[in-house]
Amino acid sequence: EIVLTQSPGTLSLSPGERATLSCRASQSVSSTYLAWYQQKPGQAPRLLIYGPSSRATGIPDRFSGSGSGTDFTLTISRLEPEDFAVYYCQQYISSPYTFGQGTKLEIK
Amino acid sequence: EVQLVESGGGLVQPGRSLRLSCVASGFTFNDYAMHWVRQAPGKGLEWVSAISWNSGSVDYAGSVKGRFTISRDNAKNSLYLQMNSLRPDDTAFYYCAKRGVAGTYFDYWGQGTLVTVSS
């Protein structure tokens, strides 16, 4: 089973700042098989990024993904108030399709 | 518009069974594999099970293998999860999720249904 470790656990930033979230895999997931999700309280997760740099439908271009092998990054270029949420990475190179433990992005 | 609507959750005693349903609309259901993902209250996401477009292939997380059974009815645009021998650590929101076009990520999710296993 591939273990995904996200860092930091909590990130405190202000609107307008740049956010950088990390996801590290216990073994390679290639350059393709990594996705990112956003989850707000009381809501289902929403797909942001897959592949690992393709934005899902309707996702603004301030969200970007990068990385390959075992190290991946989600970047939010300029934080908007609605971006404060929990973010999860997920690998889909092999079953079981595991998620990271999440990074909480909170308003500073 | 893609919609996934789960139902069937509730309070159940340990050792008992429950069947979850998910009705899909807004896409060609029988073109896609479907999944169940769960989330214990206040915790992270855990993939549970998958079924191929034609039910020819199924897959389970180790934590539910032998207890849960995934199935689908393409004529009814419906996905199911039969959960037997439920345990307190099965308590979670259960989400129905659609496989993405380009891989086994989840591009659409239902709103979730809460299963609480407690005596």
Image (spheres, coloured by chain):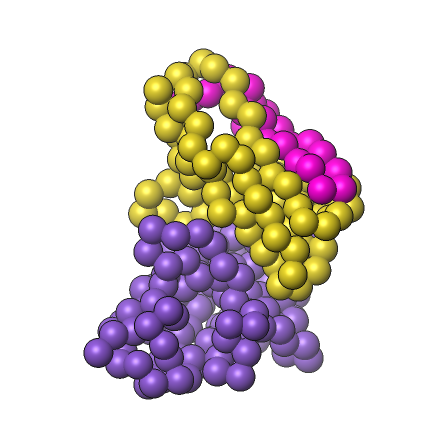
Can residue B109 be seen?
yes
Residue placed furthest toward the left: B119
In the picture, measured across the screen, residue B38 lies left or right of residue A42, that is: right
Residue in view at x 68 percent, y 79 percent: B56
- Image quadrant holding the C terminus of chain A, namely top left
Q: Can you tell which chain is drawn yellow?
A: A
Residue in view at x 62 percent, y 44 percent: A35
| Colour in which the image shows chain B | purple
Residue in view at x 53 percent, y 35 percent: A7
Instruction: Read off the magenta span.
Output: A60-83
In this view, the residue in front, A101 or B101, is: A101
Can residue B5 be seen?
no
In this view, the residue in front, A88 or B52, is: A88
Let me know if residue A79 is in the magenta part: yes
Number of numbered markers: 0
Looking at the image, residue A51 lies above or below residue B53:
above
In this view, the residue in front, A101 or A45, is: A101
- Image quadrant holding the N terminus of chain A, namely bottom right
In the picture, measured across the screen, residue A5 lies left or right of residue B101, that is: left
Residue placed furthest toward the front: A26
| Residue A101 picture location, percent across and down | 49, 47
| Residue A15 picture location, percent across and down | 40, 17
